[in-house]
Image (cartoon, rainbow, N blue to C red):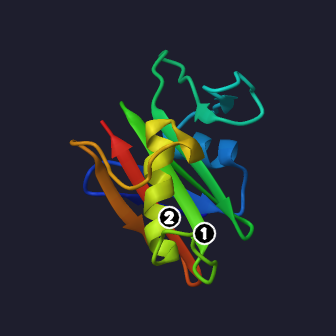
Amino acid sequence: MGRRDVTPEGVLLAWGERSAADLLSELLGEEVVVRRQCPACGSDRHGRPGVRLGDGSRPGVSIAHAVGLTLVGAVPTGRLGVDLEASDAAPPPGFASIADWVRAEAHLKATGEGLRGDATSAPGGTRRGIVEVGTGLVAAWCWLP
């Protein structure tokens, strides 16, 4: 596995130059198949990722990619969003920094709205944080338990 972290809130995170399925399998302790489902169009080519464990449980998972690195996260329940960007990337209009954008995109992934959603506010009960994944990268997570 690349690197691994567990936040004080219990969010499991892993990153490295490997596939999301490989990283999630090691993080969750068993082989998983990542499936996607877009809530807007039903496509399995994009949308929220999901996995089912051998015991039938479905942890909340999220995946992000940037500059050859994959970041994955998992939580036992609820919805999780992770995002990863190069720190020298330009933020989208309306965001003061790429760090602000990464936090907002992690939130949008957690809500399931993706880029269709409102990134300006987070609902009550939201847990979020920054991930130190390496020089030249900015990463964040958002958990809606």
Percent of width and height locating residue 85: 60, 69
User: In the shown orientation, is residue 74 left or right of residue 136?
Assistant: left
Specify the quadrant of the image occupied by residue 66. bottom right
Q: Nearer the viewer, residue 54 or 109?
A: 109
- Residue at the farthest left position: 124
User: Quick one: quadrant of the C terminus?
Assistant: top left
Label whose residue precedes the other's in the sequence (2 or 1)? 1
Q: Nearer the viewer, residue 120 or 29?
A: 120
| Vertical side of 97 occupied by 62: above or below | above
Which SS class for mark 1?
strand
Spot occupied by residue 63 in the image (x, y as percentages of width and height): 59, 48
Give 92 or 102, whichever is nearer the viewer.
92
Residue 75 appears in the rendering: no
Tell me what residue is drawn at x 64 percent, y 33 percent: 31
Q: Which residue is mark 1?
A: 85
Above or below 106: residue 56 = above
Residue at the disc numbered 2 = 102
Q: Which mark is residue 39?
A: none
Which residue appears at 57% of the width and 64% of the height? 84
Report, in whole angstroms, how far the alpha carbon at label 2 lies from the one at label 1. Answer: 7 Å
Amino acid on which the number 1 mark rests in the picture: Glu
For the residues labelled 2 and 1, say whether their Cβ atoms are less than 8 Å apart.
yes
Residue that protrudes farthest toward the right in the picture:
45
